[in-house]
Each structure stands twice: as C-alpha cells, then as structure tokens.
Image (spheres, rainbow, N blue to C red):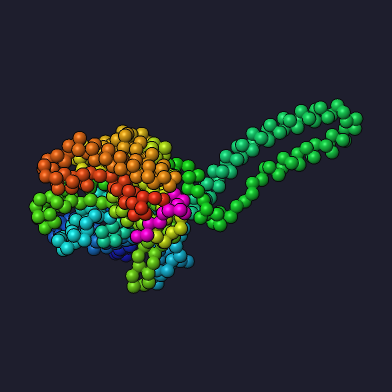
C-alpha cells in the first residue's frame, strides 16, 4: 500500500509536472512563434499562494497537491515565460535558431548551444520608421527618452501586427531612433513551389481542354480516313502517328526553383496586392496613431522639449521596399542578433532617409508600388526617378501625401476591437473611404495634382523651363489651399516674417526639392539628361 501511495505521489507531484515542462519545450521547439500556454491538456493545475500556505496546516488533506505542486508550478510558469520572452525578443528571424537548438536529436535534447544556424531566403516587404528630431529629444530627456521610444513602439507595433496579413507583420528591432519592420511573404523555396504548383494546375486545366479539342479533331479525321483505307490494319498504323505530337504537350518543363528565385516577379503571386496594401496601410495608420495617441501628444507639452509652448511634437518618417532577404541570426556564442540581410533592407532605409530631402512622410520604392492595388496606386504620387547610394538601379519613387497639420485624427479614434475588425474586413475601397487616410491627405487638391503631374512630365522630358513654371505654380496652389483652409490661422500673426514662415511650412516638399535641384543646374537639363539622377546622400 505504501509503495502504491508513493508511486501516485511521485506521478502527480514530480513526473507529471516534468512531462508538462518537456511538452512546453517540445511545442516551442516545433514552432517557436507559437505562444506557450498552460492548458488542461498538459495536466497542469494552477495553485495560488494562499492555497499553498493552507496546505501547511491541513494535516487531514488526502493529497498533497496544494503544497507539492507549487514549486513545480513555478518552474512550469518560468519555462513558459522564458519561451515567450525568446519569442518576443527574436521574432521570426530567430525562430529557426531557437527551434534547431531546442529540437531533439536522436531522442535527446541538444546539449551544446549552436548559434551558427544557416539562414533562409525569404520574400518580404521591408519598412523603416524613424522619429524626427530624435537627437534633440535624446539630449533634453536623457533617461526618459526610453519612455518616449516605448510610447512610439506601442503605437507602431500595434498597427504593424494589426495590418500585417495573418501574422506576417513583425517588428524586427529598434535601432535608436528608428524601427525596422518586416511583412514576411514566405520562404523563397515555399513560395516558388506553391507558385509552380498553381501554374501546373492552371496549365493542366488548359491542357485538358486542348486535348479534348484535339481528340475530337483526331476522331473526325480518323472517321474520314477510315473510308479511304481499304486495309483495316492501316488504321492502326495511322492512329499512333496522329497522337505523337500530343504527348509532347502533356509534359511541362521542370525549372530549378532556387536558381530562378531571385528573378521571380512578386507581382505574379496571388493576393500580393492585398498583402502589400495592408502593409502600407499599417505604416499610414501608425502615422495617424502617433498624432492621435494621448501619451504622444502630451510630449509636445513637456517643458524640456519645447519650453512649454508646443514647439516640438512627435513626428515620424517611413520608407519601404520589397524583395528577398536572408533571414537568420548573426553573431557568436557571446551575442546573437536575429536579423535580415538584403539589398532590399538597405533600400528601405534609403527610402526613409530620402523623406528628409523631399519633405514627405513616407517614400515607397517602385518595387512596392508595382505590388499595390489599382485603388492604392491612384492615391500615390510619383516624386522622382533616381538611383540611391550603393545601388545602380534606376527606379521611380512614390509617396502617399500625409500631413498632420489640420488633420484631426483624434476625431476618428476607435477601440482596438473596432480597429481589428476594420483590418480583418479590408477592401481596396478603404483607400477612398477611410477617414484617417482622407484626413492626412486633405491638403492635396485636384488642381495641385494636375499641375504637379504636368510639371513632372516636362521635368522627365528635359524641358526644365516649363517644368519650373508648372512646379512653382503647383507649390503656390498647395500654399494657397492651406491658407484658405485656415487651420493654422491662429498660429499666424500679421508680420511679414511670420507670413513667410507660414508659407514655408505649408509649401509642398517635393516641389521645393525639384525646383532647387533644377536651379542648381542653372535651370537647364544637362546634355546627358536621361530623366533620372542619383541621390548622393544616405
């Protein structure tokens, strides 16, 4: 009897909790991105501290669960928290190294930590976001700057996870004043295989139709020929020849997926426009959220930043690119960073930096613009055709006009549940109907767009005299529209200096940049002008 009781106690107090911990580790090794939860299927009974204390005085208790499981329960909770912390710290890029080191090898867990796990090629959209005036904030706030960064991160992380298709939206890391986000499409190998499978299905269906048509033609030809053949054996010799060409069309040429992976056009992927639209909206919603969030709005009233007069406020710039990258961990047994290595990551960073030159909130590379829906493209503005530092690729760059002045984002606030439902019910018409997107673009008029597009045509064609005239006119339209709206009227006095400052603040950044660029060349296109120029600064 004593042995039976001892076995039961050992099973319930020791072995079962240990098995539960191993199950948690095993599940995490299989899928590091899955949240480890304490569930009933793991035979874990949560015991509160008060229940544990009561077990000391309860000599008549028939079992010792209240006291005996408390320590093991703490271990289980600790394991769950550690795995959850790893998931949050390393994210998608570090998932493989976690899985490899936790996975069992020949029935045993890996004993030696191995950080040098080979990376994997993935397709993704890459985005950078940076806080404007961060150096000033860092100097003024000192240690409190961490609170500012975390307030910004709370908004950006929430919108990225919300608008990323499925669970594709991930905030990879913070780099001081900037954040690096990844909207992961999938592993290159898996994407190529799925695309080839879809292609085979489509072509197989088309081939079946062709075969049926050819069969009917062949059958008709055989019936016609049979009347001319006196020997019935001639028919048997004729039929195979008629089908010989048909067999060659039934077999598709096999391609080397990985060899062609880097050349794959992401535009060919089903659903990619919805995926890309949602990612870009995630950035734009982050912009709106930053100017709507009460904590972030309160920083403009911090005396250390703006002497109490609201001269400084939290503002951000964004850059995006699309393509492939190597996903994995970089480092040694002393320190590891889970990251993405790719020229497309660098391009996204260049797009973000170029926002300062053009005076815009967000810049999208041509690779991103090509993947978006037609409704989204209709709201983008082509700003220039350039090469960036470190790249020889000539590309068009685009922006979605977003301005916070005069945009009352707080009027369109919604609960997290409402925002989640809005993201789940995404439709391309959101580009036409969403209140946030309309508010941040309120300063753009039809007349301005027409003048700017005409000016850009002359600019690309090398007719810079007319380009300057049109772009200056477009800039005037932008300023006049802002003055007519009067949303900054209370900030403007009647002094000439203040009026000139007001015109400068409301002017169109891209117009100012292009006008300055053309005038720096004497207002005349260079003899070798081909409609593009290099951006020399990072």
Where on the picture, by quarter, is residue 336?
A: bottom left
Q: Going 75% across and 39% down the picture, which residue do you hit?
A: 243
Magenta stretch: includes residue 152 = no
* Residue 130 in sight from this viewpoint: yes
- How many numbered callouts? 0
Task: Residue 413 in the image: state x and y as whole percent.
Answer: 21, 39
Quadrant in which the C terminus appears: bottom left
Magenta stretch: includes residue 530 = yes
Where on the picture, by quarter, is residue 284?
A: top left
* Residue 167 in sight from this viewpoint: no
Task: Residue 382 in the image: state x and y as whole percent.
Answer: 38, 44
Q: Going 61% across and 37% down the picture, which residue do you hit?
A: 206
Q: Going 23% across and 37% down the picture, which residue do you hit?
A: 480
135 relative position to 390: left or right: left
Question: Start and end of the magenta stretch?
Answer: 526-538
Q: Nearer the viewer, residue 17 or 244?
A: 244
409 relative position to 377: left or right: left
Q: Nearer the viewer, residue 136 or 216?
A: 136
Task: Residue 172 in the image: state x and y as whole percent.
Answer: 33, 57
Task: Residue 90 in the image: state x and y as whole percent.
Answer: 34, 60
**Residue projecting furthest to the right:** 230
Where on the picture, by quarter, is residue 56?
A: bottom left
Q: Going 64% across and 36% down the picture, which residue do you hit?
A: 208
Quadrant in which the N terminus appears: bottom left
Q: Main secondary structure of the magenta part?
A: loop
């Amino acid at each position: 009897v004593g042995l039976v009781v001892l076995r039961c106690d050992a099973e319930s107090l020791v072995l079962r909790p240990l098995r539960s911990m191993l199950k948690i580790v095993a599940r995490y090794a299989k899928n590091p991105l899955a949240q480890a939860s304490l569930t009933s299927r793991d035979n874990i009974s949560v015991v509160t501290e008060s229940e544990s204390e009561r077990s000391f005085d309860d000599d008549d208790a028939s079992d010792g669960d209240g006291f005996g499981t408390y320590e093991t329960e703490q271990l289980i909770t600790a394991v769950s928290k550690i795995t959850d912390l790893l998931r949050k710290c390393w994210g998608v890029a570090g998932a493989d190294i976690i899985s490899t080191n936790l996975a069992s090898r020949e029935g045993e867990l890996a004993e030696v930590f191995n950080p040098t796990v080979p990376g994997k090629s993935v397709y993704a959209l890459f985005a950078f976001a940076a806080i404007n005036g961060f150096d000033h904030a860092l100097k003024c706030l000192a240690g409190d700057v961490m609170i500012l960064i975390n307030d910004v991160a709370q908004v950006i992380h929430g919108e990225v996870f919300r608008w990323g298709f499925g669970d594709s939206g991930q905030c990879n890391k913070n780099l001081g004043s900037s954040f690096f986000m990844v909207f992961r499409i999938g592993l290159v190998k898996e994407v190529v295989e799925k695309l080839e499978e879809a292609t085979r299905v489509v072509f197989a269906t088309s081939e079946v139709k062709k075969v049926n048509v050819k069969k009917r033609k062949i059958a008709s030809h055989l019936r016609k020929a049979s009347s001319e053949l006196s020997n019935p054996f001639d028919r048997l010799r004729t039929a195979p020849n008629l089908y010989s060409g048909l067999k060659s069309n039934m077999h598709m040429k096999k391609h080397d997926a990985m060899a062609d992976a880097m050349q794959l056009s992401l535009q060919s992927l089903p659903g990619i426009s919805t995926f890309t639209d949602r990612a870009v909206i995630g950035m734009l919603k982050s912009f709106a959220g930053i100017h709507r969030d009460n904590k972030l709005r309160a920083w403009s009233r911090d005396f250390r930043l703006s002497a109490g007069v609201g001269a400084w406020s939290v503002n951000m710039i964004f850059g995006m690119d699309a393509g492939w990258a190597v996903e994995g961990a970089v480092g040694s047994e002393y320190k590891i960073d889970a990251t993405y290595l790719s020229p497309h990551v660098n391009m996204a960073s260049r797009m973000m930096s170029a926002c300062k030159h053009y005076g815009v909130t967000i810049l999208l590379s041509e690779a991103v613009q090509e993947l978006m829906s037609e409704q989204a493209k209709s709201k983008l503005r082509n700003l220039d055709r350039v090469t960036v530092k470190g790249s020889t690729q000539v590309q068009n760059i685009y922006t979605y006009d977003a301005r916070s002045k005069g945009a009352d984002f707080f009027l369109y606030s919604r609960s997290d549940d409402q925002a989640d439902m809005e993201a789940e019910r995404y439709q391309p018409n959101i580009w036409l109907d969403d209140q946030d997107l309309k508010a941040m673009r309120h300063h753009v008029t039809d007349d301005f767009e027409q003048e700017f597009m005409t000016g850009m045509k002359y600019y690309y064609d090398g007719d810079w005299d007319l380009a300057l005239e049109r772009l200056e006119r477009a800039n005037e339209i932008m300023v006049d529209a802002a003055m007519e709206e009067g949303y900054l009227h209370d900030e403007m006095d009647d002094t000439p200096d203040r009026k000139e400052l007001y015109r400068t603040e409301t002017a169109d950044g891209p117009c100012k940049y292009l006008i300055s660029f053309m005038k720096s060349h004497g207002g005349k296109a260079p003899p070798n002008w081909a409609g593009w120029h290099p951006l020399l600064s990072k």
